[in-house]
């Protein structure tokens, strides 16, 4: 199996509202492959997919009753502490829920957390040990 990730699919309660969140709060644009059943956002080399949570559970043949911490986060890495602060402030102005304010963290970086409408956690982080290319892709 190749070492890669193609799509992250988030099960969402309301596809229209969640799509609007990513378009208006994060400023992202759906791909042309999006339709009334699924929204796809091309990131840097992978896709973020939004899909109805009940349909996603059904597709995976699982119960939909899970609640609480989902045991995963997604990270949006930037190139400086200042950029973390600026990103959080821009999201705050748009009404995004800030879970953790920007701060120095134990592993030597600087980060904050925000959540989307379905409580999926996004870490906005500066990692001084992670080199990014001009497109925000992590380098070896």
Image (spheres, rainbow, N blue to C red):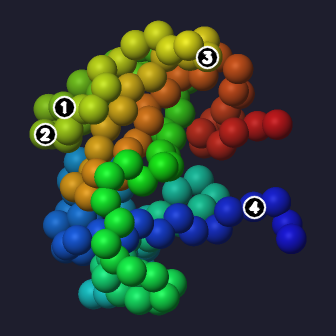
What is the C-alpha distance between the residues marked 3 and 1?
Answer: 25 Å
On screen, 29 above or below 82? below
What is the C-alpha distance between the residues marked 1 and 2?
Answer: 5 Å
Q: What percent of the width, then of the height, locates residue 95?
A: 13, 39
Residue of label 3: 107
Q: Nearer the viewer, mark 3 or mark 2?
A: 3
On screen, 83 above or below 30? above
Category of crowding for the residue at label 1, using alpha-carbon neighbours closer than 10 angstroms: few (below 14), some (14–19), many (at least 20): some
Category of crowding for the residue at label 4, using alpha-carbon neighbours closer than 10 angstroms: few (below 14), some (14–19), many (at least 20): few
Is disc 1 in contact with disc 2, using a CB cutoff of under 8 Å? yes
The answer to whether residue 47 is left or right of residue 67 is right
Residue of label 2: 95
* Mark with earlier residue (3, 1): 1
Residue of label 4: 4
Q: What percent of the width, then of the height, locates residue 8?
A: 53, 64
Q: Nearer the viewer, mark 3 or mark 1?
A: 3
Q: Nearer the viewer, mark 3 or mark 4?
A: 3
* Mark with earlier residue (2, 4): 4
Is disc 3 in contact with disc 4, using a CB cutoff of under 8 Å? no
Residue of label 1: 92
The answer to whether residue 120 is left or right of residue 129 is left
């Amino acid at each position: 199996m190749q070492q890669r990730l193609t799509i992250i699919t988030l099960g969402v309660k309301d596809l229209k509202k969640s799509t609007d969140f990513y378009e208006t709060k994060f400023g992202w644009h759906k791909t042309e492959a999006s339709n009334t059943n699924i929204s796809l956002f091309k990131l840097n080399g992978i896709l973020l997919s939004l899909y109805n949570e009940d349909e996603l559970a059904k597709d995976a043949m699982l119960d939909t009753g899970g609640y609480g911490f989902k045991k995963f986060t997604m990270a949006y890495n930037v190139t400086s502490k200042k950029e973390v602060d600026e990103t959080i402030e821009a999201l705050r102005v748009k009404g995004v829920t800030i879970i953790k304010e920007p701060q120095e963290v134990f592993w030597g970086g600087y980060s904050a957390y925000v959540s989307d409408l379905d409580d999926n956690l996004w870490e906005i982080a500066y990692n001084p040990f992670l080199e990014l290319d001009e497109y925000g892709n992590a380098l070896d």
